[in-house]
């Protein structure tokens, strides 16, 4: 069976409950749904963040996420549905940024695939954050901890 | 070929995309970075640390040593910070 994969990049907010309903509607094979939501954080160390602006590479971003989704399904054949929604544009603290939903018959594959997808998205999907803090705007630098999070998936 | 720039690479160069025709000696992604860097101050600043720059050919990630022959669209951007 082909695993249904929904991928969207949008300015608008998403409704987590509605996305889960859309993914599971009419399905009786799904026994577990894992949901990860990334939010715009207003505190970075001792600093206050006023807003984030997300830029992306249209076309490649969708294709790259599709490649990640295909890889997740290859690694965890028990995964039976995936939804990935990534917002772009200007976001303020408390706003949703990214949603990853994974479904499977039993929880293990859904948990693992969700974590894998987020680690890949962070370092390989062409999105860039610009941060407004202390009255200045600057590009967020990539974190080595994100590379480390990604590296653990290449061990198995 | 079309070249696209994103995030601070785009800001430093001052355009988001352009059509370029590098000479045949420009064979790889690294060669193209070197050739573009000589086009002006903004380019030089954008590519001052070539090791930091990430590249894609026709919307897929590639390494610096990848040949550019046949590429329709080459993109340059900083390390990604989405999610």
Image (cartoon, coloured by chain):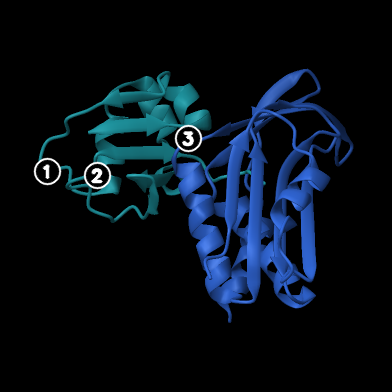
Residue A6 seen anywhere in this rendered image of the structure: yes
* SS for callout 3: loop
Closer to the chain start, of discs 2 and 1, is 1
- Residue tagged 2: B31
Instruction: State the residue in front, A57 or A83.
Output: A83
Spatial distance from mark 2 to mark 1, Cα to Cα? Answer: 8 Å
Q: Where residue A103 appears, x then y in whole percent?
A: 71, 65
- Residue tagged 1: B25
Q: Image quadrant of residue A138?
A: top right
Instruction: State the residue in front, B13 or B38.
Output: B13
Q: Nearer the viewer, mark 1 or mark 3?
A: 3
- The C terminus of chain A lies in quadrant: bottom right
Q: Is residue A143 above or below residue A96?
A: below
Instruction: State the residue in front, A107 or B18.
Output: A107
Q: Where residue B39 appears, x then y in whole percent?
A: 27, 24
**Which chain shows up in blue?**
A
* Disc 1 chain ID: B
- Residue tagged 3: A58
State left or right for residue A4 relative to residue A20: left
Badges 1 and 3, same chain: no
**Which chain shows up in cyan?**
B
Q: Where residue B48 appears, x then y in whole percent?
A: 42, 36
């Amino acid at each position: 069976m082909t695993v249904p994969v929904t991928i969207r990049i949008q300015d608008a907010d998403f409704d987590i409950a509605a996305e889960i309903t859309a993914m599971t509607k009419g399905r009786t094979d799904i026994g577990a749904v894992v949901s990860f939501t990334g939010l715009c954080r207003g505190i970075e160390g001792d600093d206050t963040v006023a807003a984030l602006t997300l830029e992306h590479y249209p076309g490649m971003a969708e294709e790259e996420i599709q490649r990640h989704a295909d890889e997740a399904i290859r690694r965890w054949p028990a995964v039976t549905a995936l939804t990935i929604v990534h917002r772009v544009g200007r976001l303020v603290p408390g706003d949703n940024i990214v949603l990853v939903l994974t479904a499977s018959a039993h929880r293990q594959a859904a948990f693992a695939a969700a974590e894998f997808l987020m680690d890949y998205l962070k370092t390989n999907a062409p999105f860039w954050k610009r941060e407004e803090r202390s009255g200045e705007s600057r590009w967020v630098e990539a974190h080595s901890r994100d590379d480390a999070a990604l590296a653990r998936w290449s061990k198995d | 070929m079309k070249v696209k720039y994103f995030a601070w690479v785009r800001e430093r160069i001052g355009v988001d995309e352009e059509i370029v025709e590098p000479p045949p000696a420009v064979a790889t992604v690294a060669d193209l970075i070197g050739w573009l860097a000589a086009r002006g101050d903004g380019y030089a600043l954008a590519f001052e640390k070539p090791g930091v720059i990430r590249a894609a050919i026709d919307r897929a990630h590639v390494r610096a040593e990848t040949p550019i022959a046949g590429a329709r669209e080459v993109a340059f951007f900083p390390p990604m910070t989405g999610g």
